[in-house]
Amino acid sequence: MSNGNYNRPDLLDLDTKQETFLDTTEMVLNMGPQHPSTHGVLRVILKLDGEKVLGTECIIGYLHRGVEKIAENRTYAMFNPYVDRMDYVAAVSNGLGYCEAVEKLLAVEAPARAQYIRVIMTELCRIASHQVWLGTHALDIGALTPVFYAFRDREEILKIFEKYCGARLTTHAFRIGGCIYEIYDGFEQDVKNFCQKFLPKLDEYEELLTTNRIWVARTKGVGVLSAEDCIALGVTGPVLRASGVEWDLRKKQPYEAYSKFQFDIPTGLNGDTYDRYLVRIQEMRQAVRILLQAVESIPAGPIMAKVPKVIKPAPGEVYHSIEAPKGELGYYIVSDGSTQPYRVRVRPPSFVNLQALDKMVRGMLVADVVAVIGTLDIVLGEVDR
Amino acid sequence: MPDENKGPEAVSPEQGAKPPAEPTASKPDATVAKPAVPAAASAAKPPDAGKPAAAKPAAPAKPAGPVPEPWDSELVSNLKRQYGSGIKEASTYVGQSYLVVDNAIVYEVLRRMRDDEQYDYCVDITAAHWPKREQQFDIIYILYSFQHNDRVRIKTQTGEGQHLQSAVNIWPTANWLEREVFDMFGIVFDGHPDLKRILLPDGWQGHPLRKDYNILQQDTEWVKINLGIESGQ
Amino acid sequence: MGGAYGGDTVSLGPILRKVFLVDLVKGLGVTFRNQSEEQRVTEQYPLERPEVYERFRGQPRLKVNPDNGESLCIVCNLCALACPEQLIVVKGERNPITKRKYPVQWTYDLSRCMFCGLCAEACSTDALELTQDYEMALYSREGMVLDQAALERGQEPVRYAR
Amino acid sequence: MLESIKQYLSTNVTPGEAGSMFWATIYVLAITIGVSLAVLSMNWLERKILAHMQIRLGPMRVGPHGLLQPIADALKLLIKEDVIPAGADKIVFWIAPVFVMMTAFTTFIVVPFGRTAAVTDMNIGILFMLGVSSLGVLGVIMGGWASNSHYPLMGSLRSGAQMVSYEIAMGLAIISAVLMTSLGATGTGTLSMVGIVQAQADQRTWFVFSMFPLGLAAFVVFAIAMVAETNRAPFDLPEAESELVAGFMTEYSGFRWSLFFLAEYAAMLAVSSIAVTLWLGGWLRPFPNWLSGPAWDLAFSFVPGLTFLGLAAMCFIGTVRMPKILQLRIQTIGLGTFGAVLAAVGLLLLVPGVRERSQDVFWFTAKVAVFMYLYIWYRGTFPRYRFDQLMKVGWKILLPVSLGVLIVTAIVGVRQELWAALTGVTR
């Protein structure tokens, strides 16, 4: 976040040029922080030649709340609700990552039943997050309708969340050591119903977009990111997978009960916006697959591991990451042996992925910038923390 | 070696590694930060901050948590052979390996890790502030190798005013991560193409994730000039 | 995944589909189908109120013993300690006869509450509860700090109209 | 007075042809009010239909089912603060929306809503329409430039390039329709809007079906180009919301913005009128060749009235189904009243004298309404093209197709003469 960027010489060297009739100059366009499709308060300064993008600069921080500083001043359990507010469209995943990191620090493991519940909730959350992405991405590219269909189906998930833990968005669903909420009567049936209803709906989205020539034209070959670029830029999640790297932490370093389920990692070939779209759509189908498996086989038993009332891990440090809907979500926690974490670092996928924007849009048109911001699936709450 | 939870094995409070040595140094400092916690308007909140603090003196004996074990692998021996005492420590803690490296050679080690050891993905760069120490800052590079499916942390220490070599030339992703470290801790990276604040406004004074930066603290002057209000609280 | 369209052989199908705008017509079909009345999901909020489930974490409420009207709160302060935002302030005195503590000051700053539910979980007597009431918007901040009386009877219902 | 009205009504010419200034003024007023009303109702319909496609309800609060919403919006826009950006060129900023609206409304002078229901029948009617409607882009560019802001500038330049590109394909498609007027025994070829419809009446077919599939191809080209011409989805790049905020209208607000809005919908109505006139038989009733004869004429003449009665019935059903809540009582009564008004109109349209005279306008309006629905439908379904793709569609697909259609139409149209000439040469 910076003020007075218009005076930056490297961005705005218009004054140095002799302006004559029919002279062409570069144009600096300020997109955001109030803009319909920067997904929140992202500000992008575009340097344009006509409509062609010569370079971009992202200005972020408008939503900075100092989550990491807050963490240092809260106990471990107290900080748990705050992580929901980073990636607020995938709050459950955030909570899962944090709880697991602290569990690792405490050297405890959630009981099997809790692990299954966590998997179900997290996969539901993945679908919900991808729904938001699908809707807003389509909206960015000009299709007004998918957003409403996506939110209609996301509503079903949020209802399950509300029934399970009492909140829809910032769920605070898990606790360190397991879950505090036992599943409600009919939870399995709700999830199954959702899955059955959702798959035809997903076909409907695809009918609306996948073969639509305008959609294909707008997304194919747009914002191409090769696998090497992805790795060099630290880009993870569906963006990396769309570039052909079959890398998913749920498979590579299985956490919770993920090793017990069968699912595929969808990958793309070209690393363009269209492949990322297909990958995310496939991920929703895979999530349904996991859900159907998990919901059939929730084991009996306790849902909370033996965790002391006052959580006080031994001094030490741990880095734990999970596959959030947007990529690798990592928590690096340093404990000094007190009740409060000494340092909590969140490795936010959106923040790191957003860095690839410049690489992806150079030489493209203004309309592609919007498409690429949408395809990166950023949540500014997570970028700025 | 994936992030497998090995669980506690050795149960003696041995003070070998650095992190266990810290609590004594940081405890007073943590209590400095604590009064800030109740950001509340309510003035009355006496017992709450006191309770954890009171529980603390009794605690150290109790948590018999996991302890770091020496980390032996080909990688470590290779690095040790090349850099000798530059590699200060190689340990594993709850199944996670880390190296502590002298800050003079960290750039070389990182480059080597990427080029020769296939740790080609820089997950994260972050820091921690230990104000009581001479070299106040830990810089932590978290690396991942797609080939080995393994994560390694490279840690180095640096002092106030000391500069580090930027890793942007190794991983472009280091750009924003280092900017954030600079923003939050004030650690300067040499050779960074555009080292400026990223989350906080350009003119902001202070680096908020340092331990001496109170949670309620803010750059009042900046707030006054730019927002036209007395306080953001 | 990627090149699903157009195989190696040049077939007439895709070309015809392209010329006759089949992809676009399919999309039009989807939007047309969804126009029917059964599909609509809008809730007309003040007229029809959404159903809220049992575990919903909404407005906090302090319970009283229905028999004698005494507060169930025993001033153990656990809720205040558990609250991440530290917005709960409880002060109490001990009843000299029953040796039971009773609250004399109980404030709950709703304006900073994030409804995480940690206070209700911490409560040792289940006196504090987050209820299903969700209409808590106010026109000013003043009414947001609830005292014991407000917590026991619930916040004044607000008419959202000027 | 009454006599003169009666006398005028019995004539069979437009006021322009009759040279009657008075009646022309009346028609102009009627058209202006009619178009404005149509825009208002379009506003409501678009929001409603789009909402239903998006599984929403749309406006529900102002009036029954939001029927009064456009009026409330208009009032809001009128009393809203009128912002002119500091760096704006004030005069141009002022003129632009007025200009756009004037050109959009002026085109309606030659639109034949019925045989006599047009202000005038120019012998170059279609050229006049094309010419005037393409002037609108000037206003858009003026507005974008005068705003002194990046987004409007980009939007207006996009708009300029887009309108110019698509006008060519549009023009070629129109020419192929005009060529068709010269077919048949009596065909002489005409650019007059009334003449074009008359030609379709004489040939007993709509041009969209004549010389199948040439007429259809030209019509499709026009139907695509006209969407681009009016800056509507999926070609709404000049006001691409997700990229350019609101395009050339970004800096406009209040009344001036509403003029742009009015002009956009008026332009949509205008180009739809062109399409209806050229290909869909203007004011002619459907199926003139299949279902001909006085019995069918009579049957079709009942349709307008019955349509209104049907709408009224829908209103009454809605009234009955309205939730029985105290707050909704006024709305229920309002809906019932509206239904009653519609029913009255429907009954009026069934009165013999009115029945015959109102038919033409009804059929014309109904056909235009179909296009309006299509506009909304497209908007609800399609993503937006990118600028270069838009140009590609315009220049690389529509232009060659329309050119080809034109050439083939010409060849087919003159094939007998051509054949004669060819055989003459070989002999």
Image (tube, rainbow, N blue to C red):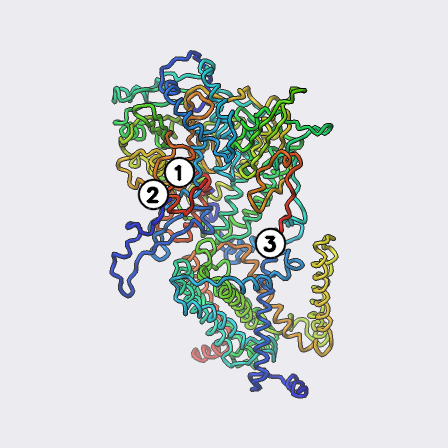
Alpha-carbon neighbours of circle 3 within 10 Å: few (<14), some, or many (≥20)?
Answer: many
User: Given the image, what chain letter belongs to the residue carrying mark 2?
Assistant: B
Q: Which residue appears at 59% of the width and 64% of the height? A: D42
Q: Which mark is residue B48?
A: none
Q: Amino acid at mark 1?
A: Gln
Query: Which circle, 2 or 3, is nearer the viewer?
Result: 2
Q: Amino acid at mark 3?
A: Met
User: Given the image, what chain letter belongs to the residue carrying mark 1?
Assistant: B
User: Given the image, what chain letter belongs to the residue carrying mark 3?
Assistant: D
**Circles 1 and 3: CB atoms closer than 8 Å:** no
Q: Nearer the viewer, residue D404 or B227?
A: B227
Alpha-carbon neighbours of circle 2 within 10 Å: few (<14), some, or many (≥20)?
Answer: some
Q: Which mark is residue B203?
A: 2
Q: How far apart in space, not on screen, are marks 2 and 1 (Cα)? A: 12 Å
Q: How far apart in space, not on screen, are marks 2 and 3 (Cα)? A: 49 Å
Where residue B173 sits, quadrant-wise, is top left
Query: Which circle, 1 or 3, is nearer the viewer?
Result: 1
Q: Nearer the viewer, residue A94 or D185?
A: A94
Q: Amino acid at mark 2?
A: Gly
Q: How far apart in space, not on screen, are marks 1 and 3 (Cα)? A: 49 Å
Q: Which mark is residue D53?
A: 3
